Image (spheres, rainbow, N blue to C red):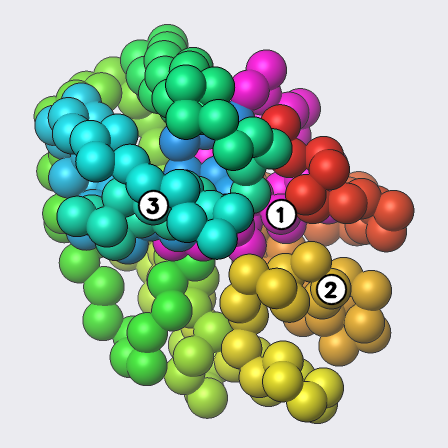
Amino acid sequence: MKFQHIISLGEDCFFRSLIDRYNIRNKFPCRMPFDGSIHPYKETCDLICNNFIDYTKNITFENNFFYNHDKNIMWNHEKTDNIDSFLYQISKRIDQFETICKNSESILFCIHYKKYNTEFDFDLLNNIIQAKYPHLRYHIFIFNNYCKEYYKKIHLNNTYVNIYWDSPIKCCNEINDDFVRQMYITQYGKDFSLNVLKELCSILEEDVYKYILNESYNFDDNLS
């Protein structure tokens, strides 16, 4: 096994959903901080670098979601509307993230990056990981679906892949939070997710066909 763990760093719930639906790795005892939520890339890097300082400062609950508007973060897959319960869960997720990163031999970090270009500041995250976890063997996989042409670039321990998402279904012309719930029950969505899985497995150096889609998986119910 080339990488012991796979951790989603956002920017949304796409990668955590993909990992869970295909049972790619054993589930963590609890969620990671960036699962089932919206975290912009630069905010994610800043949080990791600064030990999640001010992460839960000025949290608000609006229209069934928790927000940190100062950091443009939204938690949209929580099972509670109680702020104390939510903060307790956040603390557990941070502790688990730090424990895994400090004690694992190898981690594949995945980011769903939604931009209309193929530029990405890998150095920002690379420098933070190497400074905070100097003994960790890691790889960063960036997946984008906004550019119309297939694109792939591999450099050292970084991989950037763009596979264009062009769903024939009305109102589903982008991978957003609502459609992540639905995409695996459409043939287009299944084919698309398999193509992303193939790219992921090429990094893992594993056979893509050993992973079987769990079509009964319910993201909201099963995300823990």
Q: CA distance from mark 1 to mark 2?
A: 11 Å
Residue behind mark 1: 17
Residue 167 x, y percent position in the rendering: 65, 84
Circle 2: residue type: Gln
Instruction: Name the residue type under label 3.
Output: Tyr
Q: Main secondary structure of the magenta part?
A: loop
The C terminus sits in image quarter: top right
Is residue 22 rendered magenta in the image? Answer: yes
- Residues 134 and 213: in front is 213
Mark 3: give few (<14), some (14-19) or many (20+) Cα within 10 Å.
many
Do the residues under discs 1 and 2 have CB atoms within 8 angstroms? no
Give residue 223's position: percent from left, percent from top.
Answer: 64, 35
Q: Is residue 27 above or below residue 115?
A: above
The boundaries of the magenta stretch are 1-30
Q: Can you tell which mark lies on residue 67?
A: 3
Q: Quadrant of residue 199?
A: bottom right
